[in-house]
Image (cartoon, grey):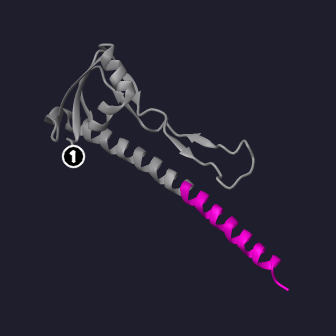
Amino acid sequence: MGKKFVRIQSTMPIVVTGGLQNINATNEESNSPERLNIRQMWSSIKVQLANGIGYYPSVVKEWNTVKALSAKGILTVGEEVDEVPEQFAEKANEIYDKLSEAIGAFESAKKAQEARGKSASTQKKKATASESAGLFED
């Protein structure tokens, strides 16, 4: 397991995102050709990088936005650490907690949507089985 924080130096204040997160809400049992239903959920998983040096959750260094900004020279991604210097500690922990909460909310929403999809699919299969059983009764 990696370290908790990563040191990033930015030449400007900028918001980076974890990319487009999505939930597949497609009803697999549908016979309709337009059954694909993907819902985007990217706006809540983001981090505001300050101008200068800052410490951020280490997961952000894997985001495509951070990699692209680093390649353009706008950001410099430094070392990963478990503990940040005292002057950065409060802000770094606040960002870490907010990001963890946003990721947790996304994962909860995704699991709930998947459960609803499975539940609807299971109910439909039960109904179909019951109807089939009724067809063969004399």
Name which quarter of the figure residue 119 lies in.
Answer: bottom right
For the C terminus, give its image quadrant.
bottom right
The answer to whether residue 64 is left or right of residue 124 is: left
The answer to whether residue 13 is left or right of residue 105 is: left
Vertical order, 42 against 117 (above or below): above
Instruction: State the predominant SS element of the stretch in magenta.
Output: helix
How many numbered discs? 1
- Give the residue displayed 32% in from the left and 45% down from the top: 97
- Give the residue displayed 33% in from the left and 24% down from the top: 67
The answer to whether residue 100 is left or right of residue 6 is: right
Which residue of the protein is positioned furthest toward the bottom in this rendering?
Answer: 138
Q: Is residue 13 visible?
A: no
Front-most of 127 and 77?
127
Vertical order, 53 against 93 (above or below): above
- Give the residue displayed 32% in from the left and 32% down from the top: 62
Name which quarter of the figure residue 47 lies in.
Answer: top left
Residue 48 image position (x, y, % from top left): 37, 29
Does the magenta portion include 74? no
- Residue at image mark 1: 1
The magenta region covers 114-138
Element assignment for label 1:
loop
Front-most of 104 and 129?
129
- Give the residue displayed 31% in from the left and 16% down from the top: 71
Residue 104 image position (x, y, % from top left): 41, 50
Query: Disc 1 residue type?
Result: Met
Does the magenta portion include 125? yes
The crowding category of the residue bearing disc 1, from other C-alpha atoms within 10 Å (few below 14, some 14 to 19, many at least 20), is few
The answer to whether residue 95 is left or right of residue 113 is: left
Q: Is residue 54 visible?
A: yes
Name which quarter of the figure residue 122 lies in.
Answer: bottom right
Residue 108 image position (x, y, % from top left): 47, 54
